[in-house]
Image (cartoon, rainbow, N blue to C red):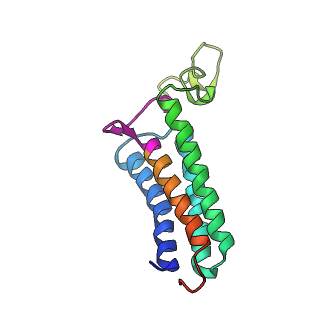
Amino acid sequence: MTRQRLTLLLTAFSVLSILGAWGFQFIGGLDPCAMCFWQRYPHWAAAGFGLLMLAMHKRLFALLAALSTFTTAAIGAYHSGVERKWWDGPASCTGRGLTNDGSGNLLDFANAKPPALCDEIPWEMFGVTMANLNAIGSFVVALLWIYVAFMPKDAR
């Protein structure tokens, strides 16, 4: 496979990951938690670096895309552990920190929809969650970005 085609494929992975997340959110009705959003931001960066790589063919952009996808993979792995209760997540995103104690906090609105919690699994198939899929897929894609960065120049 040529460098350009592989770059296009890896860029598409990040774009499709974002579109898939939006599909679950807007079509499937699954509200994302804070960590779900955190996993999207590096995909945007990787897609941008992928487009720059396609335009300028500079190794730096492939390495930055690799760093971005490693970042989202790491967040996905951390989120996977929080979902499985292997470790605590941020108090602002788990059931631990979101209590209504009558203190007049922002969560005290009547009829307010409660936020999605990071320590709850909203969707899974065969025991695999969206955070698991993002962690594994993004790790593999990050390795492929490194491969793209060090492909021979004539492999365009």
Snapshot quadrant of residue 65: bottom right
Residue 118 seen anywhere in this rendered image of the structure: no
Image location of residue 82, percent across then percent down: 53, 30
**Magenta-drawn stretch contains 126:** yes
| Residue placed furthest toward the left | 126
- The N terminus sits in image quarter: bottom left
In the rendered view, does 124 fall on the left or right side of 43?
left
Q: Position of residue 123 (x, y in %)?
A: 37, 38
Determine the image quadrant of residue 74: top right
Query: Where is 3 relative to 49, above or below?
Result: below
Left or right? Give the position of 20 relative to 86.
left
Q: Residue, x 65% and y 65% (percent of image)?
A: 63
Q: Horizontal placement of 31 versus 46: left or right?
A: left
Q: Looking at the image, which is closer to me, 38 or 65?
A: 65
Residue lying at the far bottom in this picture: please name it. Answer: 154
Residue stretch rendered in magenta on the structure: 113-132
Which residue is pictured at 45% across the width and 29% down the height?
120
Question: Which residue is found at the position 57% from the left and 18% from the top?
Answer: 99
Residue at screen point 35% across, 49% down: 27
Q: Residue 92: name its quadrant.
A: top right
**Residue 85 locus on image (x, y percent):** 50, 25
Residue 23, position as x, y percentages in the image: 39, 52
Majority secondary structure of magenta residues: loop
Rendered view: 8 above or below 70: below
